[in-house]
Image: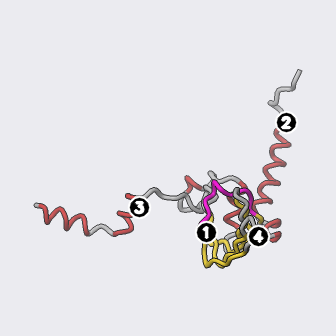
Amino acid sequence: AHSTQHTAHSTQPPLLLRTINTPQRRRRPSASNPTTMSTAGIPIKLLYEAESMKITVEMKNGETYRGMLLSAEDTMNLTLSDVVRTARNGQVSKLSSVYLRGGNVRFVALPNLLKSSPVFKKVAVMKKKMEQSDSGPGKRKRE
C-alpha cells in the first residue's frame, strides 16, 4: 500500500508541488488572471511598464542600484541585472544581478520614456470622469 501511495504522489509534476509548498509572489497582472488585473496601483503598473529598461533604485539605507529591470512584483520587490551599486560612502561595485526587497525601497527613478505610457493616459481619462461626476447631479453640496 505504501508503494502505491508513493507512485501516485511522484506522478504529480514538480512545479505543482512547488506551487503548493511555497507562497506565490503576486506578479504582473494578466488578462488570464483577472483577479490581479486591477489590484495594482498606478506606481506598480508603471514599474511593470519599465521592465527591460534601465532604472535607478535608492534604498532606505542610502545605497543606490542602477541596472536593467528584469521583473517587478506588486510588493515592489525588484530584480535587476547588470547592476552598479553605490554604497553610502560612495564606493562603487558591479553585480551581475540583485533582488531588492520592496519594503526597503525609498524611491525608483524611471526612464522619461514612460511619460507617454498608456497608464498615464488612463489616469487622465479617470481624472476627467471624476471631475465630471463631482459637478454632476446626485452630489450633495456643502452647507
Query: What element does badge 3 sit on?
Result: helix
Q: Which residue is mark 1?
A: 79
**Closer-to-camera residue (123/102):** 102
- Tell me which residue sits at (35%, 63%) in the image: 17
Q: Amino acid at mark 4?
A: Gly
Q: Residue lying at the far right in this picture: please name it.
A: 143
- Tell me which residue sits at (69%, 58%) in the image: 61
**Closer-to-camera residue (135/87):** 87
**What's the magenta region?**
99-108
User: Quick one: label 2, few (<14), some, or many (20+) residues within 10 Å?
Assistant: few
Q: Residue 136 — which label?
A: 2
Q: CA distance from mark 3 to mark 2?
A: 48 Å
Query: What element does badge 1 sit on?
Result: strand
Q: CA distance from mark 2 to mark 4?
A: 55 Å
User: Quick one: label 1, few (<14), some, or many (20+) residues within 10 Å?
Assistant: some
Colouring of the image = secondary structure
Q: Earlier in the sequence, mark 3 or mark 2?
A: 3
